[in-house]
Amino acid sequence: MCRRTMKERYPSFHQFPTIQVSILLAAVLVFLDSINVATAFASQHRHHVFAGTGGLEVQLIAAKLAIKSGDTCSIIGPSDSNYVKKCIALMYGQKVAADNNAITMPEFVSDGDDIGDSLAKADNVIIVCEDKAFDNNFIDILLSNAPKAGHLALLSRHGGKLESMENSVRNKCKQLSTKPNVEADARDVAFSVVRAGILVGGGPGGDVEGVQGGEEWGLSKHFYDTKLELSEAMNIMAMDKFTMGVKVTPGDPFKGPNFFSKVVSGNSFEARDGDTSRTAAAQALLAAVRRRGDNAGIDVSISTQKGTKPPTVKEWNDLLEMNS
């Protein structure tokens, strides 16, 4: 019995022009490559733990943006259900706060066991301070219970007010990174400090005016509704509309906030070195902790600039790399 050739067995196959076969093969390769890329991005998803003595809005914005990118988050804070509901309303609006099963949320942890569990799976620890520093013992607890954490980022203050804390945390991370590998808690922990001036803006999370291309940059519109003074609410909204640009400066060259700078900041949406957008502070912290490798840590100050949209993830990476 004679064996049939490929052309005889599959005559339609040989009717395809060569270019069509090439296109089909290319499509298959693109599909397979997309699977590899998706897998790579999935493997980069991380768990962030937030703790702070202030700047709650910054923590919430950072957690919201991290979750949107596929990461998971825990926020250390009070266990009061009203507090949690308030946080969710600020992040996603009051309707979502009434039914918090409608969207992926950060974990709000308060007791020792829950905090320990969140730290045990933490890839990064983010500490947010506005005016008050954390106690050294609390930093020790965070680091000693976060064995996987490869980066700790601190939101500090312009003008050196929290410099002592900055140096203390920097030394603690350095000590862990320089321990002999045989010691149980030896690991590389990068340290980044991001300094902010007077925190301004911070919303809206939703594309309320249809100009954000569906992107969410900050807290929900409910954030504006919590401001009882109309002038304050209007100034915050103007900041979020016209002053979304960012200036990144190495080190700590700016003076800290004072009474007069706070008065000026509260009555104008002009860009100033002494002001920092809450959205920019949150984005900078996330961009910082996602850095890995040698010289991953950064030491910068963030200020406002004119702009109608914040930097993209890539632009943040470039800004931090240029100023590291």
Image: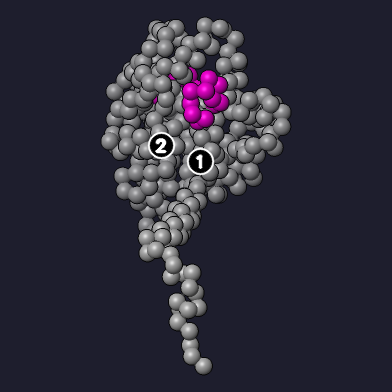
Q: Are marks 1 and 2 in contact (CB under 8 Å)?
A: yes
Give residue 29's quadrant in the image.
bottom left
Say which residue label 1 marks: 69
Q: Position of residue 160 (x, y in %)?
A: 35, 24
Asked which secondary structure carries label 2, the reply is helix
- Quadrant including the C terminus: top left
Task: Give the vertical position of 137 relative to 80 (above or below).
Answer: below
The residue that appears at 31% across and 48% down in the rendered structure is: 294
Q: Position of residue 287 (x, y in %)?
A: 41, 38
Foreground residue among 230 and 41 = 41
The residue that appears at 53% across and 43% down in the rendered structure is: 70
| Badge 2 amino acid | Val
Please give left or right for residue 304 compared with residue 213 in the image. Answer: left
Say which residue label 2 marks: 313
Which comes sooner in the sequence, label 1 or label 2? 1
Q: Position of residue 189 (x, y in %)?
A: 40, 47
Q: Is residue 22 magenta?
A: no
Q: How many neighbours does mark 1 have within 10 angstroms: few (below 14), some (14-19), or many (20 or more)?
A: few
Magenta: main secondary structure: loop
Q: Is residue 212 magenta?
A: yes
Tell me which colouring the rendered structure shows.
Answer: one colour
Task: Give the vertical position of 22 relative to 267 (above or below).
Answer: below
Give residue 208's quadrant in the image.
top right
User: Which residues, given as a range, are shown in magenta?
Assistant: 196-215
Foreground residue among 150 and 273 = 273
Please give left or right for residue 92 compared with residue 177 in the image. Answer: right
Q: Position of residue 308 (x, y in %)?
A: 41, 21
Examine the rendering and report whether any part of residue 111 can be seen.
yes
Foreground residue among 181 and 68 = 68
The residues bearing labels 1 and 2 have C-alpha atoms spaced at a distance of: 10 Å
| Badge 1 amino acid | Ser
